[in-house]
Image (cartoon, helix red, strand yellow):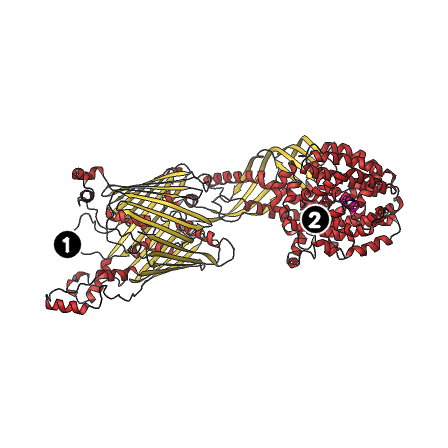
């Protein structure tokens, strides 16, 4: 096994330094400054040098194409340097008095007159050594946490080098500040930078945020994508960092999801609903373009023939969508119910109009065999270790299943469950008939699948926006879960039968899903959500694989993928 | 406006004949009171009382972000009998310090019976202990104890111990202990400041020691001119006073160093009284050798240098009339080339209360007059002195200060009914202002941050009202 850490490409990117400077500046000014510093600290120069840090692998907790988790022993003595500019209080008596309650201080007449001096500090000759926990996943970016205080020594050269007292003082203060930086701020900075680098949605989200901030005055139901992103992006970018870091080591997805507002959830749900309907008005079309850009990495993965072709970004986003879309699904199903009373609905129904979740399930059934084999060991590994990052990544992607099976269940058995309609749904309901017509008119299954795929990707695109993380899986999935459990066997049987026509191998799907269903009652709600996500992830991957290599649709898919290769999102 | 406890301490100093102004700390007191006054924050209510001549309590309730308050007790061995404590009677000029007229240096009365006076007072006060009053002074030197507990969860206790060791010496110990997190890592949670003051009139020295970083300090003031302790046979009233002082601080632990020197030239009351007396009809009393007044109004000039940080500051304060005083300050730093320009003024207004008719005017005055005329014509009608006091009490003062970046502070202090009200507002482009004295910047800065913290670009810094009632 070999790892290739590429140090220089980071340096090559010109904008990287400016971004890093901005982030560092913000981070340095966030924590309370020592009173001697009376102005903002501005990073004027930053260079990571050409000597990379030496990493010694101590432990690898998880390893996959799209994620990594390990513990390193890091030692660095490179030529990186950092130049800061600020203003300091040169009268020590002034800072002394500022930090004391004035009652018991000698109140000098004028000896404490302030004198602020601009100061330029250059930090160089960093000597770091420590244990680093590195967690990488394509959807969460890079998280680096220092187990201990990594700063061994550094050289502080400033404008006061000629005055030994001031120099020593600065050295002491800066070292203390840097320790805080390394322990607290640097992980956040790296995380944000990595998100920018690897998760285009993050960038897109930021851009979108800036774009749509002005246009936010519209009502909540109009354009779900237009308004929501602000807070979550902030949360992801700034506020969430620490919690995310914690959440990475623990099972965090639920916690982070709880941070998002119900309103945004509803909006995203409405968005996914509209996506499913294929209504043209969906605001996310721009988003679709963005999503399409995300997929190159996915495509590479897929071409590599890896078992998990689905990029974590997409899967994660879909997970959010899935959990949220539980209600919207029911909405769409309302329309379905009227139409799909006949047993044949299974094909026409999900193939035509129902959400991607269903399709995914259907496809998954076809393709189960291969995937199941690959997946099972993984699930066994991940399920017990909730605290694993891998579990987290999977869990994020899994919820799709809860959305996916649920429509079927509700449709067939629990019609009364659906009635609670969200107001957003009403907006999209009109689109449903239209979708009906379109879907029904399609004769060929392949066509349908193709359209579904497009829909899926389209659906995943808007949702893949990290903004959309807001998920409250527990609440939403609780009822579907119960339904699944209650009707699980029968429904699955039904599904099997229904889907059996499409693919002979579909029988195995229940076997893969059932274990999860059985397991879930034992666990708490979180476990349930986790299991659901896992199952969803499995189904998704199965479906993906099918897309890639299914023989049934072989020619079409080949053609399709080739055609679609320029916008790689559709490639898989 | 002075706190009630500060007012009581001032009264204590007066009662023990201690001249607080004869210290380097008060070299620029006039300019500071005119330029660096702090405006109240939000709403603050003080309830104070001088329960007995020896004991005073004060409660404060304020709303700065959240409700906070303080409880303060004071005990003085010197009976403060002559101190008006009711808020309706406290002279406002004592509370709202404005232009401070520098008094000629007075030698401490070595054998003035300062101790015996205390003993006498003690004997008159306490009958049962009257036996020991022959030498009470040895055992009972004037002592003041004051403790203030600030109550909101970062509880802070301020305690002050003040003792007159000798007619020329005063010892003060100040303790500050807080439960909250210190403002910096190096700041201890409790610190004690000891200060030994020695004032001879001609010069005064203060020696300080703080347990915080074991900071040593020294302040000294020298008054030029004849020594008040050795008065000449025929002393002519002095017209002006030139004083020079310096201060130095050093901490061997953290290598803290600070020093400054200052110079003050001020007119004395005699300089401005003479022209008025000469212009008045009673010119005969004027001594001819001082016939040329140096000024028609009192003024004060100060120059303060801080060699280590290279700053110098000059102030010019004058009292144009008893009710109007101006002050200005110009500061410049040689190293950083920062400059500061502050101007301020205070305006006293006497509310002309329509002098109330005699209280006993019940329509029978004419009859009494007739009766008096009939009985004894020699008794003149007694003018009740209270009406004159009433006029004094209804004074109010308005202070304004402006600096070079158009930070404006406005303060009105006066009396509403029985309450002493101090209302202030701070305006200005909220910018980083580093030019202020440390103590004042902390006080004012706190107010600004509290009041104007909501919006960064607002022109308002803070507005507040402080209401105090004492009995």
| Magenta region, main secondary structure | helix
Is A407 magenta? The answer is yes
Q: Is residue B5 left or right of residue A463?
A: left
Chain holding disc 2: A
Q: Which residues are magenta?
A: A406-413
Please state which of residues A51 and B412 is positioned toward the viewer in this rendering: B412
Query: Is B405 drawn above or below residue B167 in the view shown?
Result: below
Query: Is B97 drawn above or below residue B213 in the view shown?
Result: below
Please state which of residues A354 and B17 is positioned toward the viewer in this rendering: A354
Is A264 magenta? The answer is no
Q: Which residue is mark 2?
A: A465
- Determine whether the residue tagged by mark 2 lies in a helix, strand or loop: loop
- Determine whether the residue tagged by mark 1 lies in a helix, strand or loop: loop
Chain holding disc 1: B
Q: Position of residue B250 (x, y in %)?
A: 37, 40
Q: Which residue is mark 1?
A: B234
Q: Position of residue B298 (x, y in %)?
A: 28, 60
Picture quadrant where residue B326 is located: bottom left
């Amino acid at each position: 096994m070999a790892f290739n850490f590429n140090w220089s490409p980071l340096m090559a990117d010109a904008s990287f330094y400016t971004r890093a400077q901005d982030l560092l500046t913000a981070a340095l000014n966030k924590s309370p400054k020592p009173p001697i510093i009376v102005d903002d600290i501005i990073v004027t120069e930053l260079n990571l040098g050409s000597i990379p840090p030496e990493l010694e692998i101590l432990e690898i907790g998880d390893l996959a194409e799209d994620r990594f988790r390990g513990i390193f022993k890091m030692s660095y003595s490179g030529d990186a340097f950092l130049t800061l500019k600020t203003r300091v209080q040169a009268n020590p008596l002034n800072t002394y008095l500022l930090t004391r309650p004035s009652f018991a201080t000698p109140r000098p007449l004028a000896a404490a007159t302030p004198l602020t001096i601009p100061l330029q500090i250059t930090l160089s000759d960093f000597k770091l050594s420590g244990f680093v926990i590195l967690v990488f996943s394509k959807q969460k970016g890079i998280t680096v946490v220092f187990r201990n205080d990594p700063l061994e020594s550094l050289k502080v050269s400033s404008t006061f080098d000629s005055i030994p007292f001031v120099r020593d003082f600065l050295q002491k203060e800066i070292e203390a500040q840097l320790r805080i930086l390394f322990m607290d701020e640097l992980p956040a900075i790296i995380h944000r930078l990595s998100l920018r680098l690897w998760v285009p949605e993050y960038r897109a989200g930021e851009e979108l945020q800036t774009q749509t901030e002005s246009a936010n005055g519209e009502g909540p139901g109009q354009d779900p994508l237009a308004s929501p992103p602000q807070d979550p992006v902030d949360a992801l970018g700034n506020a969430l960092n620490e919690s995310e870091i914690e959440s990475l080591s623990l099972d965090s997805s639920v916690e982070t999801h709880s941070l998002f507002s119900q309103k945004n959830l509803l909006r995203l749900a409405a968005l996914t609903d509209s996506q499913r309907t294929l209504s043209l008005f969906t605001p996310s079309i721009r988003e679709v373009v963005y999503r399409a850009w995300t997929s190159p990495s996915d495509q590479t993965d897929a071409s590599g023939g890896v078992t998990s072709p689905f990029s974590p970004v997409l899967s994660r986003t879909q997970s959010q969508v899935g959990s949220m879309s539980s209600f919207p699904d029911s909405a769409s199903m309302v329309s379905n119910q009227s139409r799909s009373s006949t047993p044949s609905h299974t094909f026409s129904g999900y193939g035509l109009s129902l959400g991607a979740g269903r399709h995914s399930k259907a496809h998954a059934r076809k393709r189960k065999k291969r995937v199941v084999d690959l997946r099972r060991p993984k699930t066994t590994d991940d399920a017990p270790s909730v605290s694993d990052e891998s579990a987290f990544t999977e869990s994020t992607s899994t919820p799709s299943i809860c959305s996916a099976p649920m429509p079927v269940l509700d449709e067939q058995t629990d019609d009364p469950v659906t009635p609670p309609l969200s107001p957003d749904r009403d907006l999209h309901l009109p689109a449903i008939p239209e979708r009906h017509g379109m879907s029904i008119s399609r004769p060929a299954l392949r066509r349908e699948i193709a359209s579904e795929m497009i829909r899926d990707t389209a659906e995943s695109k808007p949702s893949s926006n990290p903004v959309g993380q807001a998920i409250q899986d527990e609440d939403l999935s609780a009822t579907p879960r119960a339904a699944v459990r209650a009707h699980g066997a029968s429904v699955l049987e039904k599904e099997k039968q229904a889907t059996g026509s499409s693919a002979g191998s579909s029988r195995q799907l229940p076997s893969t899903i059932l274990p999860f269903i059985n397991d879930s009652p034992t666990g708490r709600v979180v476990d349930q959500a986790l299991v659901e996500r896992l199952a969803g992830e499995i189904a998704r991957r199965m479906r993906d694989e099918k897309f890639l290599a299914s023989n049934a649709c072989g020619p079409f898919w080949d053609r399709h993928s080739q055609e679609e290769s320029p916008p790689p999102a559709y490639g898989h | 406006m002075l706190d009630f406890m500060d007012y009581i301490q001032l009264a204590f100093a007066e009662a023990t004949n201690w001249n607080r102004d004869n210290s380097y700390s008060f070299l620029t007191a006039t300019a500071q009171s005119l330029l660096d006054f702090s405006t109240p924050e939000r709403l603050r209510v003080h309830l104070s009382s001088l329960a007995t001549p020896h004991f005073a309590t004060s409660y404060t309730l304020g709303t700065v972000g959240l409700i906070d308050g303080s409880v303060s007790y004071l005990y003085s061995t010197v009976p403060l009998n002559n101190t008006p404590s009711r808020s309706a009677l406290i002279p406002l000029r004592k509370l709202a310090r404005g232009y401070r007229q520098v008094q000629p240096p007075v030698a401490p009365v070595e054998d003035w019976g300062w101790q015996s006076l205390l003993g006498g007072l003690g004997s008159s006060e306490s009958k049962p202990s009257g036996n020991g009053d022959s030498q009470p002074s040895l055992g009972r030197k004037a002592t003041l104890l004051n403790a203030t507990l600030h109550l909101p969860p970062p509880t802070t206790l301020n305690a002050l111990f003040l003792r007159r060791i000798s007619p020329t010496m005063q010892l003060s110990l100040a303790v500050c202990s807080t439960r909250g997190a210190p403002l910096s890592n190096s700041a201890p949670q409790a610190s004690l400041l000891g200060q030994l003051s020695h004032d001879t009139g001609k010069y005064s020295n203060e020696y300080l020691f703080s347990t915080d970083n074991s900071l040593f300090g020294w302040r000294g003031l020298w008054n030029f001119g004849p020594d008040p302790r050795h008065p000449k046979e025929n002393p002519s009233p002095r017209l002006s006073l030139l004083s020079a002082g310096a201060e130095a601080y050093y901490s061997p632990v953290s290598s803290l160093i600070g020093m400054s020197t200052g110079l003050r030239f001020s007119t004395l009351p005699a300089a401005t009284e003479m022209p008025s007396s000469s212009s008045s009809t009673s010119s005969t009393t004027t001594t001819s050798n001082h016939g040329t007044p140096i000024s028609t109004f009192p003024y004060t000039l100060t120059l303060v240098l801080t060699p280590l940080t290279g700053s110098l500051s000059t102030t010019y304060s004058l009292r144009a009339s008893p009710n109007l005083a101006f002050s200005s300050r110009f500061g410049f730093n040689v190293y950083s080339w920062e400059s500061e320009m502050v101007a301020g003024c205070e305006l006293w207004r006497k509310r002309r209360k329509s002098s109330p008719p005699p209280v006993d005017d019940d329509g029978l005055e004419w009859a009494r007059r007739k009766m008096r005329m009939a009985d004894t014509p020699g008794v003149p009608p007694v003018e009740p002195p209270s009406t004159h006091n009433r006029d004094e009490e209804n004074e109010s003062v308005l202070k304004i200060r402006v600096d070079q970046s158009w930070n404006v502070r406005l303060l009105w202090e006066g009396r509403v009914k029985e309450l002493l009200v101090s209302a202030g507002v701070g305006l200005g482009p909220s910018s980083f202002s580093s030019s202020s004295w440390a103590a004042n910047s902390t006080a004012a800065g706190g107010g600004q941050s509290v009041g104007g913290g909501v919006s960064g670009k607002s022109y308002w810094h803070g507005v507040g009202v402080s209401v105090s009632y004492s009995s």
